[in-house]
Amino acid sequence: MDRRDFVKTGGIALTGLFAGCSQGSSETDGTNSENGTTGSTTTTESSSYSVSMAPMGEVTFESVPEKWIAYDGAYADMAVALGQADGITGIGYADRYYTYVYDELDGVNVDRSTLTENELLGDTIPKEPFYALENDVHLMDPKMLINWFGWSESDVEDIREAVAPFFGNLNFRREDEWHDYRYYTMYEAFGKLANLFKETERYEQFASLHDEFITKVQTQLPSAGERPNVLLTYAGADQPEQFSPYRITDKGTSKKQWHDLGVGDALAGTGIDGLSTSDRGKIDYESMLNVDPDVLLVRGHERKSAEEFRNTVLAYMRDHDVASKLSCVQNGRVYRGGFLHQGPIQNLFLTERAAQQLFPETFGEVTSDETLFDRGRVSEIVTGNF
């Protein structure tokens, strides 16, 4: 069967693909942002099914996709959580897809050699790998390819028509002006993929585990007035001098653990915006002193352990003329800031880590062996043994 007949999009004109809304979709989207609502699929024929998501609109499949590629680790992690690890053929940034969390889950793993061999990395992403890999679906936002990597609408249409459709929504942050269509929370997007792979039962099991875990953590949190305000930044160097700021108030999925823990945004009222496609501004230690956050979070060090981070980044700040004046540095409250792209499995680990970073007296030190969620249950869901 010709690939264009095997996987096809249904009723999506190119103008509709980028109109910022779902064209012709009869799907009912969930209204609760993180409670496991997936929405319904639309059956067009007895052997086919459709799933709708902005900005693609309604996408119809003749069979469940077996081969897939993701641009970022968030959608890859979602697919792995749905039992689709064997189908991955590549990734956008292999180094930013942190698969080491799977080491704690029996029976869950991803072939790292496949990721590094088929990495869509560079100032531009060429179309050739899409043709060569012959995936059944591309888990990425097509408007991201246009606005970040210089693709045209016709480039997207060529791959959709000749190879397979795109299915994804760039939702790790909400600060890009070009993203003028609907955003999805982590579990809304996760539910979309569950419909795509026809794994709604696995999804429901995972959503239930997530809700139980978050509720358990939140019931032990101190009152809002006793929680720290945090400054979330990015600086990949071991001796950082300048930082890209993020806004905790941004509702992107990369901040989910901080939202669930109810922490305050140290940049509130400062007029400093978060990192986006159009805003690449930096802040330094002098700027930080003006807000003097309770906690400083630094992204870009996820290959380090908590101890390695303290012995490099925090140690440098303690010897720095200006950084050493920060209360968070003096109190040792400078931590790794978590993944930029996180899916549901990774989010469990990152929420556990964040709770221990911010509230060690309640949840244990981040360097301890104490765990806050059941790894065995996660493994059972992912491997289908629930």
Image (cartoon, rainbow, N blue to C red):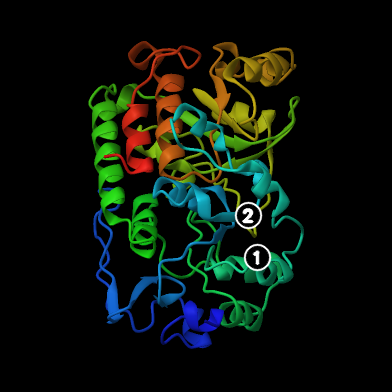
Q: Position of residue 314 (x, y in %)?
A: 65, 18
Q: Quadrant of residue 328?
A: top right
Q: On residue 133, which mark appears? A: 1
Q: Is residue 333 visible?
A: yes
Marks 1 and 2 sit apart, C-alpha to C-alpha, by 9 Å
Check disc 1 and give the amino acid type: Leu
Residue at 45 percent across and 45 percent down: it is 343
**Residue 83: horizontal and vertical position, in percent?**
41, 48
58 left or right, relative to 337: left
Q: Which residue is drawn at 42% across and 61% down?
A: 183
Q: How many marks?
A: 2
Location of residue 226 with respect to 165 vertically, above or below: above
Rendering coords of residue 321 (x, y %): 75, 16
Residues marked 1 and 2 touching at CB (< 8 Å): yes
Q: In this view, does 357 lie to the left or right of 279?
A: left
Say which residue label 2 marks: 90
Which label sits in the foreground, 1 or 2?
1
Decide which of 199, 257 is in the foreground and name it.
199
Q: Residue type at mark 2?
A: Gly
Which residue is painted at 31% across and 25% down in the image?
Answer: 225
Question: Between residues 32 and 93, which one lies in front from this camera angle?
Answer: 93
Q: Where is residue 121 in the image (x, y as percent from the top left)?
A: 72, 55
Give the structural element (helix, strand or loop) at label 2. Answer: strand
Q: Residue at x 28, y 56 (%)?
A: 200
Q: How many neighbours does mark 1 have within 10 angstroms: few (below 14), some (14-19), or many (20 or more)? A: some
State whether residue 176 is above or below residue 217: below
Secondary structure found at label 1? helix
Reply above or below: 60 against 368: below
Residue 200, numbered circle: none
Q: 47 above or below 344?
A: below
Residue positioned most to the front: 1
